[in-house]
Structures are given as C-alpha cells and as structure tokens.
C-alpha cells in the first residue's frame, strides 16, 4: 500500500515541488476541490462529487477539460496503483498559471490538476461514533460557500480555534442562524424530526448531507425538514450531529460547556450513522 500524488498527468513524489509560484491556486486560493471516500477499494458516491465539482467549476468560470469518465478512470487508477482500500482521494483544480493580477484571462490559462490518495485510520473514524465536542463561532465567510473553493481562511481560523479548545470542529452561526460546521454540515433532532439548513448559498451542499436527506433518513422513515434554525433551537435540540465525507455521521455530545443529549450520542443519530455505514458498504457510483 502506497500513498500517491498525481499532478497534471503524471505521478510525482508526495510533497514534490511541481507547482509554479504563479499558480493562481497558490497566490489567491483560486481553485476548486473535492474529497472522495474510498471504501473497500471503491470510491463512494463519486458521481455526486463529480456533479458538485463541475458545478463549482461553472460557478468559478474555470473551463472543464475532463469528462466524468476520464475523471472516474483517474480515481480508479489511483486506487489500483496505491492498493489503498480505506482512504480518501483529494482532487484540486486551480484556474491556472499567470503573472499575479487579480482579474483573469480565461483564454490564457490552463487549469492545473492535483490528485492524491491517502489512507484513513479507521480506528479514528470509528471513534468519532462515540461523539465529539463542538464550539459555537460566528460564520464569517463570504456569501457563496456553496462553491467548494480552496479559499478557506474563515474555516481554517474557526477550525484552529475549535481544536485549541479540544473540540472536533465549530458550529457556525450567521446572523444568529446555524449554517453548518467549519468542515461539515450540521443536523439537529427535535421530537424525532430531523432539521438541517436549506442547501442555499450559505452552506456547502455536503455529499454526506445529501445521502442523509435523500436516502438514509427516508429509508429509516425519519421525517426531515430543511429550514433555518437559531442558537436557541440548537440549545434545546434533543440531538445534534455533523456530517462529512471522512467521518460520516458524527454525534455531537457537548456544545461549548453544555452536554448534548445527556452527553451521549443520540438514538436517531446512531440509527442514521448505522444506515449511512450500510450504504457505504453496499457502495454507490
Ligand atoms: N461543509 C463544509 C464547510 C465542508 O468543508 C465540508 C467538507 N469537509 C462539508 C460541509 C461536508 O461535505 P461532504 O459531506 O461532501 O464532505
């Protein structure tokens, strides 16, 4: 098993110095990215990630040079060559290389593509099922966080604040409304009903969130409502959890200084975690 890095059409040493200092991804964070889980040596929900990637590129006006089939093949090659069974693939496409100037000229730029495959410590992933601590922070991001760009400064600062307080991540609030986590989506359970922020421009439409909303919750007969809710609602929720590609459904057992659902993962949360795990084992293109 070997972790691999692929840049613009060839395999390179991990950490290789192959990116130009004039790359707009390096200078401006002018790039889009995706993270796909590898489960049992197969990508999970790759077509969903590809749809989101193409949407991000359209929104950013970055030309698409690869078909979904080409991209799928590259993911498969990385898995095959690395022999990684449980891990994740990071994909990043920057707008291209040009002398530093804010405005871009699409006709003079060639998008630069980086991919890497890494292993995941499944013990760490499984431990997340025991529940994590979260802290609340203001959402200081721009108005288009639905586009998955590498320009993640507010997320980075929030995540660092959270980790300094020994929290898994932060729950973000914009004008008093709970949007999502610094690196994940947020769900609340109240009286057996599941709530999450609508998939508008104020959250990233997480693929794991989509799995819960469109597949796992319906298959378990759990009612879901996509609507805005505030800090008061969060504080009075029966259960809270995060979702993301790496951790799946992650129960929140403490928010700031207060225990959530008695300091233990909630029952609805655990049913959803279990349902998602089953779906991941079955596989989804
Ligand atoms: N929101 C943010 C801000 C994220 O960075 C992520 C991904 N880490 C998510 C939500 C979850 O998205 P996904 O389920 O596609 O990993």
Image (spheres, rainbow, N blue to C red):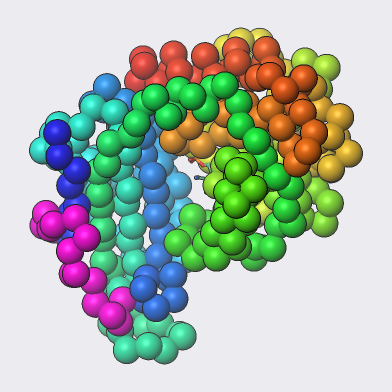
Residue 89 percent coordinates (x, y): 30, 43
Tell me where residue 97 appears, x and y as whole percent: 28, 78
> In the rendered image, which quarter contains the N terminus?
top left
Q: Tell me which segment is drawn in magenta.
A: 9-23
Magenta stretch holds residue 17: yes
Location of residue 98 by image quarter: bottom left
Considering the whole magenta stretch, tell me its main secondary structure.
loop
Residue 228 belongs to the span the image colors magenta: no
- Residue 81 visible within the image: yes
Q: Is residue 234 above or below residue 264?
A: below
Q: Is residue 280 left or right of residue 97?
A: right
Quadrant location of the C terminus in the rendered image: top left
In this image, 203 relative to 17: left or right? right
Q: Nearer the viewer, residue 247 or 225?
A: 247
What is the tally of numbered marks visible in this picture?
0
The reply to whether residue 180 is in sight is no
The spot of residue 84 in percent (x, y) is: 20, 32
Up the image or down, 125 lies above or below 21; here it is above
Residue at image position (70%, 50%) is 172
């Amino acid at each position: 098993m070997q972790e691999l890095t692929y840049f613009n059409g060839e395999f390179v040493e991990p950490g290789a110095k192959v990116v130009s200092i004039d790359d707009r991804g390096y200078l401006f964070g002018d790039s889009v990215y995706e993270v796909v889980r590898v489960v049992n040596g197969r990508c999970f929900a790759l077509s969903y990630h590809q749809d989101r990637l193409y949407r991000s590129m359209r929104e950013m006006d970055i030309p698409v040079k690869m078909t979904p089939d080409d991209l799928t093949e590259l993911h498969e090659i990385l898995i095959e060559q690395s022999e990684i069974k449980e891990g994740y693939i990071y994909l990043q496409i920057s707008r291209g290389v040009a002398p530093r100037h804010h405005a871009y000229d699409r006709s003079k730029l060639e998008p630069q593509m980086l991919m890497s495959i890494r292993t995941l410590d499944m013990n760490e992933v499984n431990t997340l099922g025991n529940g994590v601590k979260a802290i609340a922070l203001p959402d200081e991001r721009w108005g288009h966080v639905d586009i998955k760009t590498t320009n993640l400064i507010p997320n980075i600062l929030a995540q660092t604040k959270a980790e300094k307080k020994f929290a898994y991540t932060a729950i973000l609030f914009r004008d008093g409304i709970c949007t999502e986590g610094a690196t994940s989506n947020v769900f609340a359970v109240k009286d057996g009903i599941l709530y999450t922020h609508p998939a508008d421009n104020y959250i990233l439409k997480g693929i794991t969130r989509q799995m819960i909303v469109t597949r796992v919750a319906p298959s378990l007969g759990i009612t879901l409502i996509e609507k805005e809710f505030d800090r008061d609602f969060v504080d009075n929720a029966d259960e809270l959890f995060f979702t993301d590609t790496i951790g799946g459904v992650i129960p929140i057992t403490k928010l700031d200084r207060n225990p959530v659902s008695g300091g233990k993962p909630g029952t609805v949360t655990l049913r959803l975690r279990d349902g998602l795990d089953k779906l991941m084992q079955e596989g989804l293109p």
